[in-house]
Amino acid sequence: MGVINVEKSGRLEGVVQIGGSKNAVLPLLASTLLTDEPCVLGGVPALKDVDIMCRLLECFGAEVTEDRLAAQIRIHAKNIKTNIAPPDLVKAMRASIVAMGPLVARTGSVGVSLPGGCAIGERPIDLHIKGFRSLGAFVECEESEDGGGFVKAEAGRLVGAEIYLDFASVGATENIMMAAVLADGTTIIENPAQEPEIVDLANFLNKMGAKIRGAGTDVIRIEGVEKLHGAEHTVIPDRIEAATFMLAAAITGSNILVDNMLPNHVVPVIAKLRETGVYVREAFGGIEVDATRGMLKATDIKTLPYPGFPTDVQPQFMAFLTVVEGRSNIIETVFENRFMHIGELNKMNAGIVDNGRHALVPGGASLKGAKVRATDLRAGAALILAGLAAEGLTTVSDIYHVDRGYEGLTEKLSKLGARIRRSES
Ligand code: UD1
């Protein structure tokens, strides 16, 4: 199993190109199960999670052709040969759950083992189930001996319904949207997730012939149609990858250009960086992040569903705040257990106090290199960023988490001048 070695890196410089969004491409791939015609997705990042989703589509009977050089994938789900998702793939990636909506809508039946993936909290799927039941599906959950479970949904043609989400869950909104596009009648989702990935999915579904309005607002309205057709689409840039590079510049006191991104997708990250004194401006179609202009100061962060501060950037921002002068408070409201990186950052002398969902970062730390473990995807990124600012060598293990969601992270950082390399030992 490989590790990533990082050394204190001084100032980074240059331009980094952001790839396609992991969280957008996964439901987009799943949605191609809704039609028996071919679909083509462009701007697809080369990620482990994308591989897993492609294998899952193949298991269901889709023909998947990948053109890695062109960052393109063609999916043709002409016939669905099974609607039971293989447990190993679902356990490897929680996002597999978004295949449920398309399959129940197209074939009237689906079965999946309960999700795996990053161990960040309990992550129930009650809202997905509530959505399917509201649309007329019969949903059963069985517990398995290993503590996991199996969910089965069955329906004739789904029927449009009004669905209120108690929490603006990204996955539940995607699943319900994909199920409702082929339902009989109108579906209204109240309090849906408003993330850019939801808008991207709605845009693609509409290209396939769906009738979705309001994606990206607090009410989504879907008029069900009889059939969808094939379509082509380019995935939006990855706002979390973009934010990670913005923080790489901040923690190393650098000036870089983060290119091929949509600044309006990272508004809270820009606002919080500016509060610390980092200069951020839109430039040359991307974002210039300049942390070379003097002393930076502490700030507080509270994660919230979009357009609030993204939970997926909380660990990386925390890593940055460890080196800034002054105390910062970080409140995590989206996941109940997303502070596993604190123990690892503390091995590097960060001195963070973990109070459950509230973390106190004392700031002004002289980080020291250490052997640390990527406890989940974004935690891995945070530790790499901390390693860039720490004296000595930081060795990050369990980097398969990082490979799930970052395309060429070490290569892109090296190109900016970071002292980082992968080692297979
Ligand atoms: C997606 C993202 C993930 C991001 C998260 C929140 C993908 C592939 N992953 O995950 O990177 O961190 O959004 O922005 O897009 N919840 C329930 N019941 C449910 C569903 C969710 O209580 O049925 C809770 C979860 O336990 C969690 C919160 O809602 O506490 C957010 O989960 P959700 O928005 O569903 O996240 P994901 O779609 O899993």
Image (spheres, rainbow, N blue to C red):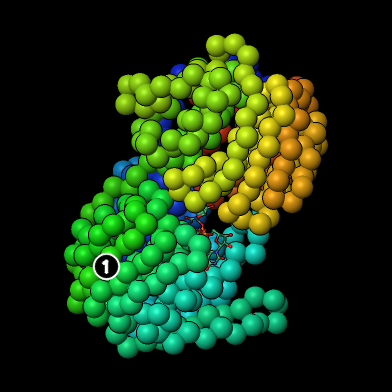
Q: Which residue carries the number 1 mark?
A: 222
Left-right relation of 81 to 404: left
The quarter of the picture where residue 184 lies is: bottom left
Quadrant in the picture for the C terminus:
top right
Residue in the foreground of this view, choosing between 265 and 375: 265
Amino acid at dot 1: Ile
Residue at mark 1: C-beta within 8 A of ligand 1: no
Report the number of numbered marks: 1
Q: Residues within 10 Å of mark 1 (few under 14, many from 20)?
A: many
Percent x, y of residue 267: 43, 35
Is residue 351 visible in the rendered image? The answer is: yes
Is residue 380 visible in the rendered image? The answer is: no
Percent x, y of residue 243: 50, 35
Percent x, y of residue 303: 57, 46
Left-right relation of 302 to 42: right
Q: Residue at 46% across / 22% down in the picture?
A: 280
Image height of 20 relative to 369, above or below: below
Q: Residue at 50% across / 62% down in the picture?
A: 167
Instruction: In the displayed orientation, state which residue is furthest to the top.
Output: 294
The quarter of the picture where residue 388 lies is: top right
Q: Residue at 76% across / 30% down in the picture?
A: 362
Residue in the foreground of this view, choosing between 267 and 125: 267
Image height of 210 relative to 365, above or below: below
Percent x, y of residue 399: 64, 45
Residue in the foreground of this view, choosing between 89 and 191: 191
Q: Residue at 55% across / 25% down in the picture?
A: 275
Q: Give the secondary structure at mark 1.
A: strand
